[in-house]
Image: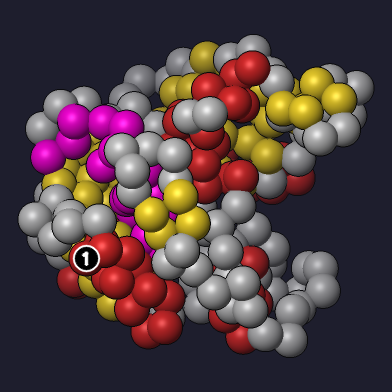
Amino acid sequence: MDDLQRNGYRIIQNPQKFCFGMDAVLLSGFAGVKPGAECLDLGCGNGIIPLLLSAKTKGRHFTGLEIQPYSADLARRSVALNHLEDKIRIVEGDIRNASKLFDASSFDVITTNPPYMTGSHGLTNQEEAKTIARHEVLCTLEDVIRESVCLLVPGGHFFMVHRPFRLTEIISLMVQYRLEPKRMRLVYPYADREPNMVLIEGIRGARPRITVEKPLIVYREPGVYTDEIYDVYGY
């Protein structure tokens, strides 16, 4: 069990399977959830993003969709551990069929930290759970965007963390499905390095216009986070 530094919440993890990373934490800080919002996290893993958003925001309800039974079970156990059964629901299912699992236009906010690598890109980890989380084995970027559009209310907000090397594809698919990119922020490990993450927000059916926010720098020096990162983590 790890302390999330928010509301006393804890999360159950198995390091031999897959643990949440900084990308999930940064996404929870980037996502805007208004009071009363119905929220869905696609590919929720062990439930880290619903847990963090329930602590940080005044959203009404959070649903996590996860295809791997073991990860879904960990997420449910963490929800129960924190006595959040009335606020968070974990559903075991396939992102590719999300629009059949939930009613159309039923969520105000969708978040996702999807697999970054295409099936043929990068080394495939021999541990199946990690492979599914990191590679597009069970769903593609297009699956995530297509299903999100079906499930978002008109004007609903989509928040995703991904890798900059796929930014052209990300924006192209979002525009294709009328999930208009509205806000983007690049994340840099150090000020003098190339970005290794991108945070992006889209709005269903919005007019074209994107705001590129100032860079987010993770480390001031080796082992020392910048003040903004400490704030996101709640330290």
At which x and y percent is residue 67?
39, 77
Residue under the image location 23 percent in, 45 percent down:
39
Q: How many marks?
A: 1
- Tell me where residue 146 sits by quadrant: bottom left
- Tell me where residue 170 sits by quadrant: top right
Residue 152 is at least partly visible in this image? no
Q: Secondary structure at mark 1?
A: helix
Snapshot colouring: secondary structure
The amino acid sitting under disc 1 is: Ala
Front-most of residues 152 and 90: 90
Residue 166, relative to residue 185: is it above or below?
Answer: below
Residue density around tag 1, few if under 14, some if 14–19, many if 20 or more, within 10 Å: few
At which x and y percent is residue 165?
75, 45
Q: Is residue 51 magenta?
A: yes
At which x and y percent is residue 56?
32, 32
Residue 48 is at least partly visible in this image? yes
Residue under the image location 81 percent in, 68 percent down:
122
Residue under the image location 81 percent in, 35 percent down:
223
Q: Which stretch did the figure color magenta?
A: 41-60
Horizontal relation, residue 95 to residue 22: left or right: left
Q: Which residue is mark 1?
A: 80
